[in-house]
Image (spheres, helix red, strand yellow):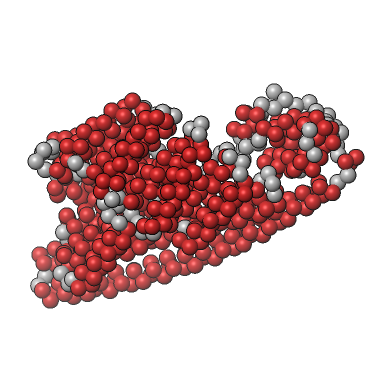
Amino acid sequence: MQKLLFLHIPLRLVVLCSFLCLVANNSVQAQNDDIDSLKKTISETTNPAELASLLHQLVWEMSYYNPQESVEPAQRALNLSLDLGDSSLIATSYNRIGLVHDYAGNFDLAEKNYKRAYDIQLTFEGEDATDGLLNNLASVYYYTGRYEESMDFYLKSLTIRESKRDPSIPKSLKNIAQSYNNIALLLKRQKNYSGAISYYQKSLTIKKELEDIGSLIVTHSNLGALYMEQDSLVKAEKEFEQALFLTDSIGDFVSKAMILNNIGLLKNKSPNSSAAEQFFLESMSLYQQIGDFYGKATAQFNLANLYLDQGDYGQAEQAALEVLKISDEIKVPEVNMSALHLLSQINSKTNPKKSLAYLSAYITLKDSINDVAIANKINQQAVMYETEKKENAIALLKKDQQISEAENKQKDLVISKNQNYQLFLIIGIGLVAITGLFFVLYYRSRKEAAEQRAEKLHVQHQRELDNLRNSLLRPENNETSERIELGISQDQLNLYLLNPLSDREIEVLYLIAEGKKNKDIADQLFISVNTVKTHVLHIYEKLDVKNRTEAAAKANSMKILK
């Protein structure tokens, strides 16, 4: 059974914790309390420098859980820092903006802001202060698949941290352990498992010396994920159990729920896959207790996949519908989309019409998410543009002030500043008007394009339903008896298909290619004629064809005919 990307979310959560484990020893409620307390302090603070620092702290706390809401305080902190002209605060502001975009998945904007922060920090504080930003840039390159650049930056960061190593300063050792862990993750992604294990062991050594239980949980979990990827299930289970023991020792229910989910995935790969059910259920129960419904949806999704693998379509559909219900409550479209796709898979064999309805809803939601992502990116680019405009305006204003101070009296300086302000105001109003017009035209064109796509999708689905209806009502004697000389390799064919053909569908495709009618195919495979018709419909849908001859032609066009 082909799994969706959503299935691997628990493992990715383990990976992300190595960069910034915000919840290892805190409950979700405690995190929210800290944020509320920070917001109250910010509302009462008037000193610009103190306010900028508090905003930096707020963004740090919020960005992992809610990057969208972190944009405004991050931008506000940058504006304050620019007004103060404090290079350290400006560098930190760009670093925080980069962090927000990093967690939001806008890696190009994250890279841009991290580089700005790096250049400022390098100029005013020296290379020894840049290890954190080098690490952040390396993580961006890691997630964008630029592995050579990622390794280069991770090693640069590690070199600086090793040079500043001081056993009496725990943070110094923690940073080195973090670098080891991140390099191990990169080596794992590159399938260099022996190298990854070596760096994980180095990280574990330091974390054990520091008795950093939260970080030990992360590294043991990452090792478990590595061994599971190698199918070393015994070693993987040992690492997960060690991580599980540590979570109990500090009462870290968030990590425990995640690890139980991962053990469920591990058990699902073992011969006794039925044991996975209990771990998924325990994980779901913990997520329910701590109020993490996103995590609960993850475990519930994996449970639905387990039932589907076991051929229990009833329980699989019930579990997938529960995921759909949770996604509607937490307002996470990606979870909703994954649940719809899974429901389409579950019903593909038993109820093709229902499967097609779920698939249609999945495609519609996917297009909608893409449109929203594009709109968000445009808004973020607009914010960056306004920031750049303000920087340029400040730079020009400072230059004008220097010239005026050298050549004119205080009165002339005031007049010059007012004139410049008016000029910038006029230019700003013009730019805002042009930008507003562009956005209006752009959104109008996007809306029209979306309506056209929806209409095309409706027509396409109606045509598919008509074809399905006609094929089911067509008499047997009207089926083509044309014999198609064809030899098809299943492995080759499935490489080209988004939704691979099953073994039974391949058998039916071979018999179709031999010119056999539905009744003959049913007799030879010992199945009913209606079942044959259903398989034929699936073949047409997956190959995107309308008849038997087109199926052979489509295979030929894909260069998979022997």
Identity of the residue drawn at 20% across and 63% down: 54
Q: Quadrant of the N terminus?
A: top right
Viewer can see residue 512? no
Left or right of residue 533: residue 248: left
Left or right of residue 334: residue 144: left
Q: Quadrant of the C terminus?
A: top right
Place of residue 246 in the rendered image (x, y in percent of width and height, measured from the top left): 28, 43
Task: Please tell me in which quadrant of the rendered image residue 542 appears.
Answer: top right
Q: Residue furthest top?
A: 562
Task: Please tell me in which quadrant of the rendered image residue 554 appears.
Answer: top right
Place of residue 463 in the rendered image (x, y in percent of width and height, measured from the top left): 74, 53
Placement of 445 over or under 128, stated as above or below: below
In the depicted view, which residue is nearer to us: 337 or 26? 26
Identity of the residue drawn at 67% across and 53% down: 354
Place of residue 524 in the rendered image (x, y in percent of width and height, measured from the top left): 80, 30
In the depicted view, which residue is nearer to us: 385 or 189? 189
Identity of the residue drawn at 22% across and 54% down: 92
In the depicted view, which residue is nearer to us: 286 or 193? 286
Left or right of residue 384: residue 285: right
Place of residue 90 in the rendered image (x, y in percent of width and height, measured from the top left): 21, 57
Identity of the residue drawn at 48% across and 63% down: 329
Viewer can see residue 309? yes
Q: How many marks?
A: 0
In the depicted view, which residue is nearer to us: 245 or 22? 245
Left or right of residue 46: residue 18: right
